[in-house]
Image (spheres, grey):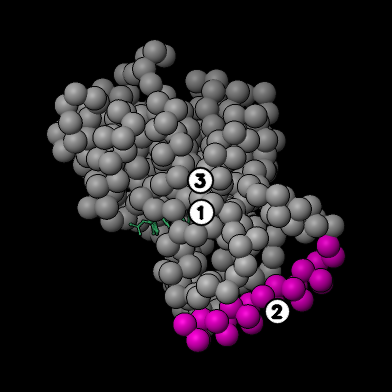
Amino acid sequence: MTSEAPIAHAAATSPGTGPGRTAPDAATVAGASAGDPPVALITGATSGIGLAFARELAGDGYELVLVARTEQRLLETAEALVEEFDITARVLPADLATESGIAAVTDLIDNERVDVVVNNAGYGLRTSALRTQPDELVALDRILNSAVQVISWHAAHRMIERGRGGILNVASMAGLTTMGAYAAAKSAAMVFTESLASELAGTGVTATAVLPGFARTEFHDRMSVDMSRWPRIAWVSAEAVAREGIRDGRAGRIVSVAGAQYKLAYVVAQLTPRPVIRVLSNGFRRTRKARRSRA
Ligand SMILES: NC(=O)c1ccc[n+]([C@@H]2O[C@H](COP(=O)([O-])OP(=O)(O)OC[C@H]3O[C@@H](n4cnc5c(N)ncnc54)[C@H](OP(=O)(O)O)[C@@H]3O)[C@@H](O)[C@H]2O)c1
């Protein structure tokens, strides 16, 4: 590991040293033996679904590497997880809508043992595709799709060498629709993961596409969408998404959908002709636009 070790900051260390102290450097982890705790890297780990994954995996004794953009929040999240679960957590500030941010994560994966990767970071657009500037469309595709593919690629190769590992890619039920650039990127991430899972068969490594429905996180607030009128049945908790995603990953399932209503919707979507999906997507898009303009 060079002086450019990708772990920019150490939030907390192993039990006994307390939050805020310096963690072991990356080389220590690179030399980890089979007896060491498993390591999970989670992107978008400071909020919502990513935080729920971090909490689930911390509860299972995983050492964590938390990735997001906002450094202070990463540090606070890592400290809280260390305090609650008595684990080791480190942070890697990186913007996954940029190539350098993606490279910071793949550098770490190439140089350290990471047993589970959760590609979760993401956001939605406030505007329709035509009202969004092309560079913003590219950035969206980078975080929701390219980052997922590139990080999965690096993780898969390292995991195949070790004969085990799990990749969980958070896509979306929206990826089954035709609702703009977000749906397109999520669909691509989902299809890539399904294909990767087939390619990984027999290697001891699994890939699972996690398809959340609506979950109460910061996601919709960041887009300024008023979701207050959606009925209770439309919602699934971030915790359920993470719990079921991990369970499905361990079972080697290729797609994970949490919530009975979304499991049904997933099946119905497979059976629905594409022109009908387009009509429904368009109606949904108009409703959201109206609610956004009222928000
Ligand atoms: N909530 C839903 O209803 C829903 C439904 C389907 C799918 N999803 C998907 O679930 C995933 C998690 O979303 P969430 O609902 O948990 O949203 P959230 O509460 O807004 O959390 C997003 C996380 O991603 C990080 N992030 C955002 N932009 C980033 C960037 N450019 N680079 C690195 N990290 C970034 C955020 O931290 P920083 O801002 O500090 O970077 C935060 O940790 C996303 O991929 C989303 O598309 C959500």
Q: Nearer the viewer, mark 3 or mark 1?
A: 3
Secondary structure beneath label 2? helix
In the displayed structure, would residue 28 be above or below residue 59?
above
- Circles 2 and 1, Cβ within 8 Å, touching? The answer is no
Question: Can you identify the residue that label 2 sits on?
Answer: 283
Q: Magenta part of the protein: which range? A: 272-295
Q: Secondary structure at mark 1?
A: helix
Q: Earlier in the sequence, mark 3 or mark 1?
A: 1
**Mark 3 surroundings: few (<14), some (14-19) or many (≥20) residues within 10 A:** some
How far apart are the alpha carbons under marks 3 and 1?
26 Å
| 2 vs 1, front mark | 2
> Is the residue indicated by label 3 positioned so its CB lies within 8 Å of ligand 1?
no
- Ligand 1 contact, mark 2 (Cβ < 8 Å): no
2 vs 3, front mark: 3
- Give the mark nearest the N terminus, 2 or 1: 1
In this view, the residue in front, 257 or 255, is: 257
Q: Could you say whether the residue bearing mark 3 is in a helix, strand or loop?
A: helix
- Residues 119 and 264: in front is 264
Q: Which residue is mark 3?
A: 239
Q: Residue at 71% of width from left, 55% of height from top? A: 261
**Distance in Å between CA atoms under marks 2 and 3:** 29 Å
Q: Residue 135: percent from the left, percent from the top?
A: 44, 72
Q: Specify the label residue 146 is tagged with.
A: 1
